[in-house]
Image (cartoon, rainbow, N blue to C red):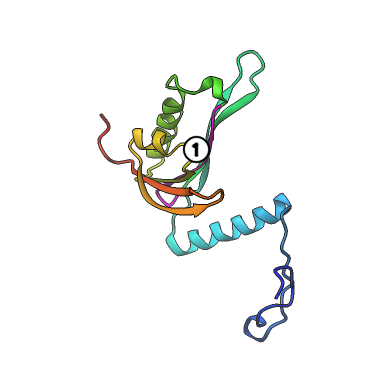
Amino acid sequence: MAASDTTAGAPPRGGPHPDLAVTDAPAPGDLAAISDALDRFNVERTGVDDRRPLAVLVREPGTHRVVGGLTGRTSLGLFFLDLFFLPPELRGGGLGAEILRRAEGEARARGCAMGVLYTITFQAPGFYRKQGWRQLGEVPVAPPGAGRVFMTKDLTARRP
């Protein structure tokens, strides 16, 4: 069956079959509907309502335009690091470590005990290792020889 087939699968519990749509351009409202529904489900099951975005923004002096930074979220006592980017001219001087330190500190302040992230072998696994993150596993990705590296960090461990 083609991935775009909207009739695949059995009807849910005898009711009408929902329409299915595969897209590479979901509307922000559609993404929010899924995210919000999952959040409500988690809160109902756990009684914990702590999901919040977390960002450390790097702004250009003068214009205050965002040129890099870190985005993620905290939820159920876990810090998820989603995206982290610095332009080449801002790398190598300790700014990345400071951004990560601030994000981890905010996650700790929100009650997070652990952090999780994924990176790619040609991106920054070595950087994260230097900051105390450890590898959980690796999954091969394109191009050949590259891998998606999953990492974690105990945010309760004593820092040097």
The quadrant the C terminus occupies is top left
**Residue in the image at 44% along x and 34% along y:** 103
Q: Position of residue 134 (x, y in %)?
A: 34, 44
Which of the pair 128/156 is nearer the observer? 128
Residue at the front extreme? 144
Q: Using residue 53 as the reference point, say whether residue 33 is left or right of it.
A: right
**Residue in the image at 71% along x and 52% along y:** 29
Q: Provide the secondary structure element on which disc 1 rests.
A: loop
Q: Position of residue 16 (x, y in %)?
A: 72, 81
Which of the pair 127/111 is nearer the observer? 127
The amino acid beneath tag 1 is Gln
Q: Position of residue 55 (x, y in %)?
A: 53, 35
Which of the pair 70/145 is nearer the observer? 145
Q: Quadrant of residue 155?
A: top left
The quadrant the N terminus occupies is bottom right
Q: Using residue 124 as the reference point, say whether residue 159 is left or right of it.
A: left
Residue denoted by label 1: 123
Residue 136 shown in magenta: no
- Neighbour class for label 1 at 10 Å: few (<14), some, many (≥20)? few
In this view, 17 is above or below 79: below
Q: Which residue range is magenta in the image?
A: 75-86
In this view, 55 is above or below 58: below
* Majority secondary structure in the magenta region: strand
